């Protein structure tokens, strides 16, 4: 089948929520452990290049960093971890920490992590629903409280914590300082529309993210590279199956989408694919 619905798995996190959106169904109940992430995975397993999560925050995540491909392979992993966040909802005043407000040395970074002054060094940025933020590996970052988002990342479950606001969780100072780029965040090129209903949100890193807003029927050519489709809301269909918020679909070969609804499309590579989508 060209289009496959990925399975969903809830993950408990100390900073997560006990009440999730309606589409999450029975994944979390009031009084249960908070759910911070829902992972969308291949039903048969395997080592896909990309992983998609839905993330829900009631508290700030740790100040953390991920290795790039070179640093990850030196530590025995297949790939590094670029990631991108599409903001679904943000409470008033919600922020994401992205890079530092100024360049510092590795020793200054270690000292700031130990004494807590790193919290004031982080470049905290307000966020709003509908924006996408691309965070390359090596970027020091922290997702704030009161945010629901879709995370697209290289498929690596490896986080080095620099600071955790006094929580009783392990820090990874040696590895974090070694892989971090302790300076300002470098944004990707600005979004651009490449065809009606097709806007490229992020390029230049290890994967591309696009936003599709067309209500017309279309054929998707997913051959030649991993392609993930992520509904932002309910509406439309893929190969006759309803598209709904909370899903992630893998497309291999050709698939047909039709009807209303907005999607994110994500695939490995630094540049947008010129022939990704064509009219029916």
Image (cartoon, rainbow, N blue to C red):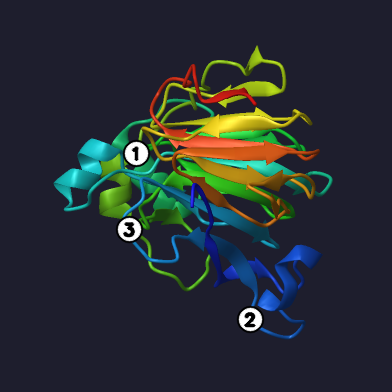
Q: Earlier in the sequence, mark 3 or mark 2?
A: 2
Q: Quadrant of residue 131?
A: top right
Q: Give left or right: position of 95 versus 172.
A: right
The residue identified by callout 3 is 172
Name the image quarter holding residue 264: top right
Q: Examine the rendering and report whether any part of residue 229 can be seen.
A: yes
Image quarter of residue 49: top left
Q: Residues within 10 Å of mark 1 (few under 14, many from 20)?
A: many
Apparent side of residue 47 relative to residue 199 in the rendered image (left or right): left
Q: Which mark is residue 237?
A: none
Secondary structure under tag 1 reads loop
Vertical side of 201 occupied by 72: above or below = below
Q: Residue furthest bottom?
A: 31
SS at mark 2?
A: loop
Tag 2 residue? 33
Return the mark for residue 180: 1
Residue sitting at x 79%, y 31%:
215
Residue 6, x across and y down, in percent:
52, 59
215 w.r.t. 113: above or below: above
> Position of 274 compared to 238: left or right?
left
Alpha-carbon span between mark 3 and mark 2: 25 Å
- SS at badge 3: loop
Q: Are marks 1 and 2 in contact (CB under 8 Å)?
A: no
């Amino acid at each position: 089948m060209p289009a496959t619905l990925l399975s969903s798995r809830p993950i408990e996190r100390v900073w997560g929520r006990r009440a999730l959106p309606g589409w999450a169904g029975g994944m979390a109940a009031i009084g249960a452990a908070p759910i911070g992430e829902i992972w969308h995975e291949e039903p048969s397993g395997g080592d896909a290049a990309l992983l998609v999560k839905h993330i829900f925050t009631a508290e700030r995540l740790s100040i953390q960093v991920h290795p790039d491909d070179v640093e990850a392979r030196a530590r025995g992993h297949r790939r590094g971890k670029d990631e991108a966040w599409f903001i679904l909802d943000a409470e008033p005043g919600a922020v994401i920490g992205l890079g530092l407000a100024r360049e510092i040395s590795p020793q200054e970074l270690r000292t700031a992590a130990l004494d807590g002054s790193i919290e004031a060094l982080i470049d905290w940025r307000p966020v709003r629903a509908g924006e996408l933020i691309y965070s390359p590996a090596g970027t020091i970052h922290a997702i704030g409280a009161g945010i629901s988002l879709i995370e697209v990342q290289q498929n690596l479950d490896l986080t080095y914590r620099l600071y955790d606001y006094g929580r009783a969780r392990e820090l990874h100072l040696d590895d974090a300082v070694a892989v971090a780029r302790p300076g300002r965040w470098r944004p990707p090129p600005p979004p651009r529309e490449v065809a009606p209903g097709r806007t490229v949100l992020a390029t230049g890193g290890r994967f591309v993210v696009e936003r599709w807003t067309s209500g017309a029927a279309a054929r998707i050519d997913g051959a030649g590279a991993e392609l993930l489709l992520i509904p932002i809301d309910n509406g439309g269909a893929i190969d006759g199956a309803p598209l709904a918020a909370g899903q992630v679909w893998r497309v291999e070969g050709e698939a047909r989408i039709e009807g209303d609804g907005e999607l994110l499309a994500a695939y490995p590579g630094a540049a947008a694919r010129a022939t990704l989508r064509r009219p029916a």
